[in-house]
Image: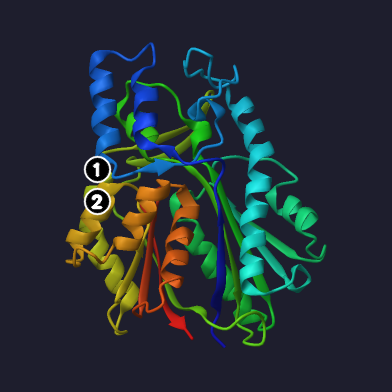
Amino acid sequence: MTARIVSIGTAVPGAAVPQEKLRAFFADQPDAAPLTRRLITAAFDAAAISSRHTVLPGLHGEADDIFTRDSGELLTPGTGTRNEMYRRQAPPLAREAAHSALQEARIGEADITHLITVSCTGFFAPGIDYHLIRDLGLPTSVERSHLGFMGCAAAIPALRQAAQITDSHPGAVVLIVSVELCSLHIRSSSDPEQIVAASVFADGAAAAVVTADTSRGRSGGLSMDHFATALTEEGEADMVWTIGDQGFDMRLSAEVPRIIGREIRAAVDRLVGSAEAPQTWAVHPGGRSVLDRVEKGLELSPDALQPSRAVLSDYGNMSSATILFILRRIMQDPAPRAPIAALAFGPGLTVESALLHTVT
């Protein structure tokens, strides 16, 4: 039996914040020189994002004297303070996404046998997996795994692990939960790479229910046929995610889209092999330029990446959770075209991919 994604649930914090409001917030920082303001305006306007969600009150206009002052000044709390907010905010958001996925799958909490959590924007123990078991009422015997600090590509390895679990245990029902609070690590900066990061990253959570047992849950979903991983020969220093004294430091150089553009054809060829060419694409929107390079490198039609561009516009880049938002949008299409190729990019530079098809 082939593993299938029965359902995907999503959750975002607070109300959507318009991109133009976020652009003005960063451009109005007291330490922003005229050149920095021009860089901020250019980066935010080029991002192809309409709105994003964040757990930071200051970006909603509510000062908290931890991240923002009444004046609108963005403060620079230490990593411990940022991680403490992650510890408080991530579990309820993860629970909301998981509850939505279980409801849509028509699978009860007692039926979950395995739990895989995914995150790269915070750490604590007992972690999100523990809170999900307690707060959702999952069986205490659930087998848990955590994929941490793998960056934006991590949800695809989580799907692969779920498929491997169902290969070994045909009756297994796996709950995958990805939660990312990227905005916790933003800061005011004149560094172009930090400005680009501030212009695209956002907060969100997504959960998927996976099983190979056709008697479990509702019918339909996405069958997971094949996975592939490609580590590029360059890019180790171009997409980097490290822990600093004032939050996690993201290095996202201008070379990233160009590297992806050069490498994407070979990565997709390894994924597809002799199978039918993909008709539908779910591509992680690391940014508008990444999608542009993928479209050009694969010679896709202008509308081929519409689901990815729509999620980028509505939510921004929510790191690992984003690809699940895109797959959910594809699942909601009444007539999706199969097969479906899912692609995501992580530090290294790594390309994670999956080949799927719709199940009726």
**Which amino acid, by three-letter code, is at mark 2?**
Ile
Give the residue displayed 22% in from the left and 60% down from the top.
295
Q: Quadrant of residue 120?
A: top right
Residue placed farthest to the right in the image? Answer: 140
Label 1: which secondary element: helix
Q: Does residue 348 appear in the picture of this structure?
A: no
- Percent x, y for residue 15? 52, 41
Q: Does residue 357 appear in the picture of this structure?
A: yes
Assign the N terminus to one quadrant of the image: bottom right
Query: What's the colour scheme?
Result: rainbow
Packing grade of label 2 (10 A; few <14, some 14-19, many >=20) is: some
- Percent x, y for residue 252? 34, 39
On screen, residue 290 versus residue 61, left or right, reads left
Q: Quadrant of residue 20?
A: top left
Residue 106 to residue 255: above or below:
below
Label 2: which secondary element: helix
**Alpha carbon of mark 1 to alpha carbon of mark 2: how far?**
6 Å
Q: Read off the residue under disc 1.
A: 255
Q: Read off the residue under disc 2.
A: 259
Residue 175 to residue 91: above or below:
below
Give the residue displayed 65% in from the left and 70% down from the top.
174
Give the residue displayed 39% in from the left and 58% down from the top.
344
Q: Nearer the viewer, residue 123 or 86?
A: 86
Residues at badges 1 and 2 in contact (C-beta under 8 Å)?
yes
- Percent x, y for residue 71? 48, 12
